[in-house]
Image: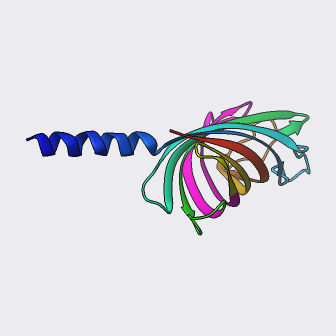
Amino acid sequence: MKTLSTLAVLSLTAAAQALTIDLQIGTGKPSTPLSGGASADSTSIVGVGIGTHLSENSHLGLNLSTRDIVTSDPVDAKARTALVEYTYELNPTGGIHPFIGAGIGYAWLKNTDKATALASDVFAGLRFTITESVDLTFTARAHQLYNVDFSQVQGENNRQVNSFEAIAGLRFKF
């Protein structure tokens, strides 16, 4: 019985060390979401993520972020997203860790006809070890929103909004 309790404590300790919190800030350039040419200028992206390592090479997390979609008349649309993201590290050893990943989730929209949309992303980047518990990340991400309706502009329904983003972040490992 003592062996089982020791194993349980070791498992909980290992799981607790696998938790991560990511703070992200970056910029994005949405493609022209309206056929009339209205687009968002380079927009800021702010995000936070929480996740866990599934293995030495893989990480699963929940990423919450906010961004502009369109910032010109007659539309000033914004999106808040929640995506479940899977990250695979190509080289988990050493100080530099290249990674790739993908995510899918939901977006809450402001100033659009529909209040929600499907969201997805694919990304690649580099993670640099600063200390044992802090990493610096640089990520290039293609972010998509599906079936966005801009009711303020006639004929602008079911649009896909694509954004290419550059993000810097800090990952705290617990």
Residue 31 in the image: x percent, y percent?
A: 83, 54
- x, y (%) of residue 163? 77, 53
Position of residue 40 relative to residue 103, above or below, is above
Depth check: give the residue in front, 64 or 11.
11
Taking the magenta stretch, the answer to whether it contains residue 50 is: no
Name the residue at the left extreme. Answer: 1
Residue range highlighted in magenta: 97-126
Residue 100 in view:
yes
> Residue sitting at 37 percent across and 45 percent down?
14
Say which residue appears at 59% left-offset and 61% top-offset. 101
Q: Residue at x 42, y 55 (%)?
A: 54
Check if residue 115 falls in the magenta segment.
yes
Quadrant of the image occupied by residue 96: bottom right
Question: How far across and down, in percent of the image, does residue 70 sit?
Answer: 83, 40
Query: Which one is in front, 66 or 146?
Result: 66
- At 70% from the left and 60% from the top, the residue drawn is 125
Which residue occupies the foreground of this view, 40 or 87?
87
Q: Position of residue 149 (x, y in %)?
A: 70, 42
Q: Quadrant of the N terminus?
A: top left
Which residue is at the front of the view, 41 or 74?
Answer: 41
- Image position of 88 (left or right of 53): right
Dominant secondary structure, magenta: strand
Q: Residue furthest bottom?
A: 90
Q: Is residue 161 left or right of residue 61?
A: right
Left or right side of 62 for 28: right
- Residue 4 sits above or below residue 87 on the image: above
Left or right: where does residue 20 sit relative to residue 112?
left
Q: How many marks?
A: 0
Asked whether residue 67 is in view, the answer is no
